[in-house]
Each structure stands twice: as C-alpha cells, then as structure tokens.
Image: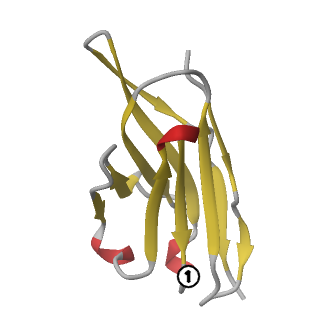
Amino acid sequence: QVQLVESGGGLVQPAGSLRLSCAASGSIFITTMSWYRQGSGKQRELVATITRGGSTNYTESVKGRFTISRDNAKNTVYLQMNSLKPEDTAVYYCSVRTLVRGYVDDYWGQGTQVTVSS
C-alpha cells in the first residue's frame, strides 16, 4: 500500500508564492506524478504532470506561473506556485502512478488547502 503525504498549503496574498510537496512511502517504482486541484463547487482538474524522465505538462491557466518537479530518489513531487491568483484557491491533490510487475495503480494524497486572498 502506497501512502502519499502532502504539505505546504496555506493562506497567501495575491501575487504570492507557495511550494507544495508530496512524498510517497515505500520502495516503489513511480512513473507519472501529478497535481490536481478542486475549487469549491468545481470539478477536479489536472494542474500539472511530470514523467519519470522529467517531461512536464501544465494546464493553460498556470503556465509560466507554476513549476512541477520531482526527486525520484525520495519519491517526492513538488509544485512551486508563483504569482498566485484568487482563482488558484482550491484543495490541491497529488497523484502518483506506480508500475509493479506489470500492473498499474494510481494513488492519491489527502489534499492540502491553498487559499489566495488579501
């Protein structure tokens, strides 16, 4: 069983920055690592994805402001969020995809609240 522990959320003023972290427990092979978010009354959306090799993709609204990165040795993914806007307010979830003996599984973190407000 893989457990994900997220940290780094909080309250920040517009134009501020936050860095989210998500660490996966266990000796596992992780392929893709992602961050999602869900605002109040909205559907969960994919924010950013990073492959094991470091290729990244971002949703259009965060391009140029957010940076996803990972440390494979630590099974940890990060999301550096700069120039935050009120519309970035949401619960942010990390998700990882593992590959074990040919089987793929997806795991989710518990979520961390990010609130952008003055």
Q: Circle 1 sits in a helix, a strand or a loop, which is it? A: loop
Q: Residue drawn 66% across and 58% down?
A: 113
The answer to whether residue 25 is left or right of residue 55 is right
Q: Is residue 81 above or below residue 45?
A: below
Q: Which residue is mark 1?
A: 84
Q: What is the x, y in percent for residue 30?
A: 40, 32
Q: How are the residues colored?
A: secondary structure
Q: Residue drawn 52% across and 62% down?
A: 79
Q: What is the x, y in percent for residue 5?
A: 66, 39
The answer to whether residue 108 is left or right of residue 18 is left
> Residue 24 or 37: which is nearer the viewer?
24
Q: Where is residue 17, by image quadrant?
A: bottom right
> Residue 118 or 83: which is nearer the viewer?
83
**Quadrant placement of the N terminus:** top right
> Residue 56 or 34: which is nearer the viewer?
56
Q: Amino acid at mark 1?
A: Leu
Tally of numbered discs: 1
Q: What is the x, y in percent for residue 34?
A: 41, 48
Q: Residue drawn 58% across and 40% down?
A: 74
Q: Outermost residue, top direction?
A: 101
Q: Is residue 63 above or below residue 51?
A: below
Q: What is the x, y in percent for residue 104?
A: 30, 20
**Quadrant placement of the C terminus:** bottom right
Q: Residue drawn 54% across and 73% down?
A: 81
Q: Outermost residue, front direction?
A: 73
Q: Where is residue 84, by image quadrant?
A: bottom right
The answer to whether residue 99 is left or right of residue 118 is left
The crowding category of the residue bearing disc 1, from other C-alpha atoms within 10 Å (few below 14, some 14 to 19, many at least 20), is: many
